[in-house]
Image (cartoon, rainbow, N blue to C red):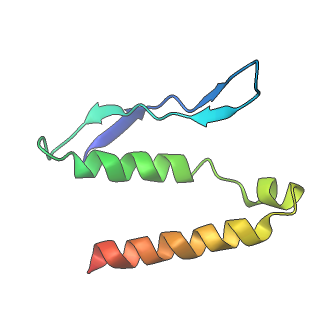
Amino acid sequence: MGRYTKSELTEVNPETLMVTLKVKIEGETEIPTWKDDLKIKAALALLETVDRSHFAEKDLVHKFEESIIDLKLMVETLED
């Protein structure tokens, strides 16, 4: 599978304090046309940075749990 090597994650607008999540993926791929192997590696790398306690700090555990359900459904869809 492709190898994910780099990402740039967060940008904050100092005037509005709006946070933008931007992802730049660099790495090697074994699927040159579609790069799906690299996309999966990048998605996994991003998910590794998620911390449930950050949701809990803002009383948003329900949002975390909803997102986990969405992720599980996405994986099931990919498996079919």
User: Splitting the image into 4 quarters, where does residue 30 fall?
Assistant: top left
Which residue is drawn at the image coordinates 78% and 58% (left, top)? Answer: 55
In this rendering, is residue 79 above or below 58?
below
How many numbered discs sit on the rendered protein? 0
Which residue is drawn at the image coordinates 46% and 35% (left, top)? Answer: 23
Which residue is drawn at the image coordinates 87% and 63% (left, top)? Answer: 59
Q: Does residue 10 appear to the left or right of 74 in the view shown?
A: right
Q: Does residue 34 appear to the left or right of 54 in the view shown?
A: left
x then y, percent, for residue 60: 80, 63
x then y, percent, for residue 13: 69, 22
Q: Nearer the viewer, residue 80 or 27?
A: 80
Q: Nearer the viewer, residue 1 or 24?
A: 24
In this rendering, is residue 59 above or below 14?
below
Q: Which residue occupies the extreme top position in the image?
A: 14
Q: Nearer the viewer, residue 72 or 60?
A: 60
Question: Which quadrant holds the C terminus?
Answer: bottom left
Q: Which residue occupies the extreme left position in the image?
A: 33
Which residue is drawn at the image coordinates 40% and 72% (left, top)? Answer: 75
x then y, percent, for residue 26: 34, 30
x then y, percent, for residue 33: 11, 43
User: Splitting the image into 4 quarters, where does residue 61 fall?
Assistant: bottom right
In this rendering, is residue 69 above or below 63?
below
